[in-house]
Image (cartoon, rainbow, N blue to C red):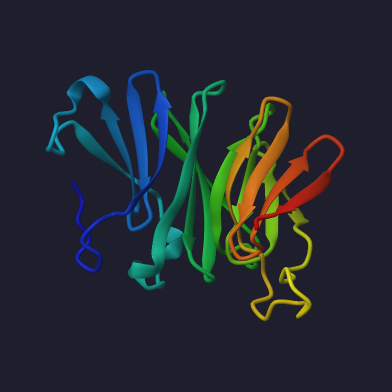
Amino acid sequence: PERPSAFGTIYPISIAFNEDDIYLGGIRSKSLWLANVSDLKNNSSEGISNISLPISSFKGIDPDLVSTGSIEIDKDRDALWISMLAFAVKGQLFKFDIPSRTFTSYDLPPHLNSPVGIAIDKNGNPWVTDHGTSIFFMLNSTDGKVTEYSTSPLFSNSASGLNDFGYTLPYWIRMDSTGNLWFNEHVGNKIARFNTTDRTLVEYWIP
């Protein structure tokens, strides 16, 4: 239902399912979108409703820079996590309690200003990739403490050595059934696996 004047579309980027409910996030949207499968109609936005995100802390930043990173559902706790960012300027996480439809906001350190991908561990803590650096991190959902980890330095796959860009830009992230995190490094050109138990990282080059 939303068509931002500067872009023409919200660029739908992330989706989560909760029974018959669908939650949707868009790169160019400052809202969470909700629909029930039975209410949707083909070639129509009927049945899709807007849940405004509490982005008051982004005031003063160019609105065109402020966007949703991604969303991830924690079905065990009936909650949805949303990453919000003004790329390379500011980042924030929101926890949306589905039954009460209320938000809790989590501020991030200034250098973690591009949070995108989210995966939830068995304790309900989100693991997030920061797409402006080489960092991925865990947010303790109880006390808000952030624990940071880094990929290996960005090297090209040639004799030239260090890439001029400097950061690997981790992006999408998923948790497997054994507690391993898997994520891609956008500029690092790798797929990474991080064992959340022994804190070891293995990275695989993409040919």
* On-image quarter of the C terminus: bottom right
* Horizontal and vertical percent position of residue 56: 41, 58
Q: Quadrant of residue 37?
A: top left
| Left or right, 131 with reference to 200 | left
- On screen, 136 above or below 127? below
Residue at the extreme right: 198
Left or right? Give the position of 90 relative to 6: right
Q: Nearer the viewer, residue 44 or 36?
A: 44
Q: Residue at x 20, y 61 (%)?
A: 8
Residue 97 is at least partly visible in this image: yes
**Splitting the image into 4 quarters, where does residue 17 fall?**
top left
Q: Is residue 57 left or right of residue 25?
A: right
> Residue at point 54% right, 70% down?
88
Give the residue displayed 34% in from the left and 54% down from the top: 30
Image coords of residue 25 (percent x, y) = 37, 45
Q: Is residue 183 above or below residue 185?
A: above
Q: How many marks?
A: 0
Residue farthest to the front, as pictured: 207
Q: Quadrant of residue 148?
A: bottom right
The percent position of residue 192, horizontal first and vertical second, equals 71, 49
Res 143 seen here: no
| Nearer-the-camera pick, 47 or 173 | 173
Q: Which residue does the image show at 44% across and 64% down from the upper left?
A: 58
